[in-house]
């Protein structure tokens, strides 16, 4: 074999290693809990996150985190759903919408709640507590009535609770 063959062979080996690493990282991301997601509906970008209530129970009882939405409910399967809305065109946070969420375990009727506005640092977002009892597939339906004549947007996210 000529010397010209070896650089090509090394390049192919490096490419194979790179593709293998990429495939492994994609499969690990795909199998991870999708505790957050983002979607664009019309001119609105919707972000959501699901956090275990245990995280909020670590804050002092007098803190804003521990008091939001009337306090952190007891129970093992309680999670906090957090939703943020942005004007896709300008990037500005939408702070005066009326937002609700419906959490539905596949095959059941679900629970719907109005999400309360609350502050995280200097940013307003919307949230509420929901129970995710089983490690199963859920739908998270977000409905927002936008200020002024912005209309109503809806988006249903698929969520796998781990």
Image: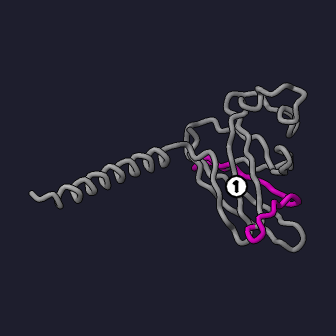
Residue denoted by label 1? 47
**Relative to 113, does residue 68 appear above or below in the rendering?**
above
Residue 154, x across and y down, in percent: 72, 64
Please check the rendered image and state whether residue 105 is part of the magenta-colored stretch, yes or no. Answer: yes
Quadrant of the rendering where the N terminus is positioned: bottom left
Residue situated in front as seen by the camera: 53 or 24? 24
Q: Residue at x 79, y 68 (%)?
A: 152
The prevailing secondary structure element of the residues shown in magenta is: loop
Please check the rendered image and state whether residue 1 is part of the magenta-colored stretch, yes or no. Answer: no
Indicate the secondary structure of the residue bearing disc 1. Answer: strand
| Magenta extent | 88-109
- Check disc 1: other Cα within 10 Å, few if <14, some if 14-19, many if 20+: some
Residue 63, x across and y down, in percent: 88, 31
Residue 90, x across and y down, in percent: 78, 69
Q: Quadrant of residue 56?
A: top right
Residue situated in front as seen by the camera: 113 or 38? 38
Q: Residue at x 44, y 47 (%)?
A: 25
């Amino acid at each position: 074999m000529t010397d010209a063959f070896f650089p090509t062979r090394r390049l192919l080996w490096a490419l194979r290693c790179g593709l293998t690493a990429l495939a492994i990282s994609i499969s690990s991301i795909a199998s991870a809990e999708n505790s957050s997601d983002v979607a664009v509906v019309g001119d609105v970008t919707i972000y959501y996150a699901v956090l275990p209530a245990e995280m909020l129970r670590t804050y002092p009882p007098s803190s804003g985190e521990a008091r939001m939405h009337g306090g952190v409910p007891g129970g093992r399967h309680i999670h906090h759903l957090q939703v943020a809305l942005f004007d896709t065109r300008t990037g500005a946070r939408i702070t005066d919408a009326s937002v609700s969420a419906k959490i539905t375990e596949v095959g059941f009727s679900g629970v719907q709640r109005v999400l309360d506005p609350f502050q995280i640092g200097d940013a307003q977002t919307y949230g509420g507590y929901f129970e995710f009892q089983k490690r199963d597939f859920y739908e998270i339906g977000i409905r927002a009535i936008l200020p002024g004549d912005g209309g109503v947007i809806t988006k249903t996210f698929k969520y796998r609770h781990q």
